[in-house]
Amino acid sequence: MKISKKMLTKSEKIIFKKIRKFVTNTGINVIPRVAGGWVRDKLFGNNSNDIDIALDTMSGYEFATKLKDYYSEDLFFSRIGKIKENPEQSKHLETAVMKINCIFVDFVCLRSELYMDSRIPQIKIGTPKDDALRRDLTINSLFYNLMTQEIEDFTEKGIQDLKNKIIRTPLCPLITFRDDPLRILRIMRFAARFNFKIVPEIKIALQNKEIHDALLTKISIERIQIEINKIINFKRSSMVFLWVFKYNLYNSIFKDDTVYDNKKAKLFIKIISQIKSIFVLPVKKIKSTKKNNSYRIQDKDLDLKDVLEHHHPANCVILNIYKGIFLNIRVIVQSKKPTFKNYLICKENLKFPNKFCDLIQKIEENFLFLEKNIAIFDLTILNCIILIRKMKNSWLETFLLFISIQKLNENVVLEEKAVLFLSFICKNNLCHCYDIIPLVRGKDVGRLTNDKTKYSVLLEKAIEHQILHKSKSKREILEYLRSELNNI
């Protein structure tokens, strides 16, 4: 395998040519190499803007400064940015960043690492082989030598593992994981992302209790959150969470002591993946079938795929995080002001942004509301409007999670009723009724009555009437509210 000139973009050809010219003309004693992910992606036939230049005899900042001075009048080169050493954020050596021909390029020296009792290593300048061996995977340990324009595989396994679609660590997996437990998540993420096979040695190491404890104690919450965020943003997230439960990593990753059943976790992940898949089929009426644990489609005249794609772009991410935290759905840990355990896991244990955590809290509240009301609600447009208006813009995620949990618990009655409600909502174009612009405002209601306790009820009735009758007349809605005053 090699990287031909045809595989390089126009910008990459310009950048690499200028670096080679600088090294050759100045006679500087350094070999610049492109490292890691860029090489892997190129060999996959994919483009990558993640260009890291590794240097064998000097720091990244020193090299970038000399390069900038050499091309002092070249507008292709921006000013140099310096990323200082910050071990807590996995920045173990000072790095220089420079924009060349509209692409950001990082410059850093080759390094070797020595880990003691922390995830943060002791760093020293190393050889290309030292640098390759300290990486997480053989497929991420490849270099592209800019001077010879050839690939270098110092682990002697990287190229072959790419060809054979294998996930392998450069060193013994136990050493790799002890040195940096974060690599456990990274390895599972890469295996899922590329659909590669994990070698048996890694699977054995993943069952090691010492590794579980190291993941719990040595790795920072912020770094776990970054990896989890990457995992829930790609299609094969189910594979990662299946491994998390299979190898008993849940408690170490989510910092939660909930006791769980591996078989039940595996079943839930399978179910929620199936529930999501119904939205790629045109459906009018959906019925559950125990025989094949799937859904039978009848009267194909409604495309629910559009609902999923256009309703709320974040819902797949939310559903993916629940593949990990479904164990605690609707569990309340603070009773005075109901706070849900999953909200606290996301906010305190994983440090997700407040907006994300607030959405989790809202979905948990919606779940309880749906659980209490769907059994007694008749399937009518008005009741659908009431449900969606209550759950607001997270109604769809709530419905999908609710259906998944009912299926997991074999509650066929609630499961089928929720599915019918969901289908009915989509069929009657009610998906966005939570954010409809009301024709009747608070000041209009104030002219009808002086009783302020009735304001919120009248405003909600006005919205429901507006949606239900597709009324465009404010006067018609006000007349309806007058008729309802005595009934409130």
Image (cartoon, rainbow, N blue to C red):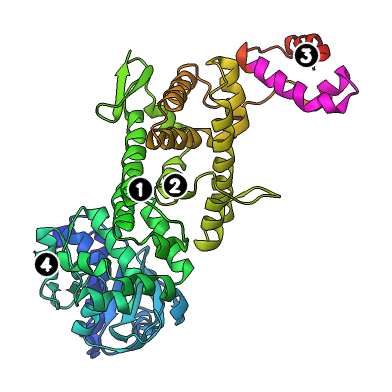
| Residue type, mark 1 in image | Ala
Mark nearer the N terminus (4 vs 2): 4
Tell me residue 484's x, y (percent): 78, 12
Tell me residue 236's x, y (percent): 29, 48
Q: CA distance from mark 3 to mark 2?
A: 42 Å
Q: Which residue position holds label 3?
A: 481
Q: Which residue position holds label 2?
A: 326
Q: Are marks 1 and 2 in contact (CB under 8 Å)?
A: yes
| Residue type, mark 3 in image | Leu
Tell me residue 345's x, y (percent): 52, 57
Q: Which residue position holds label 4?
A: 159
| Residue type, mark 2 in image | Phe
Q: Are marks 4 and 2 in contact (CB under 8 Å)?
A: no
Q: Nearer the viewer, mark 1 or mark 3?
A: 1
**Is the N terminus in the top left, top right, bottom left or bottom right quadrant?**
bottom left
Is residue 381 shown to the viewer in this render? yes
Task: Tell me: residue 292, above or below residue 272.
Answer: above
Residue drawn at 46 percent across, 71 percent down: 220
Q: CA distance from mark 4 to mark 1?
A: 36 Å
Q: Nearer the viewer, mark 4 or mark 2?
A: 2
Task: Judge left or right: residue 255 versus residue 295.
Answer: right
Q: CA distance from mark 1 to mark 2?
A: 8 Å
Is residue 2 shown to the viewer in this render? no
Mark nearer the N terminus (1 vs 2): 1
Task: Judge left or right: residue 256 versus residue 189.
Answer: right
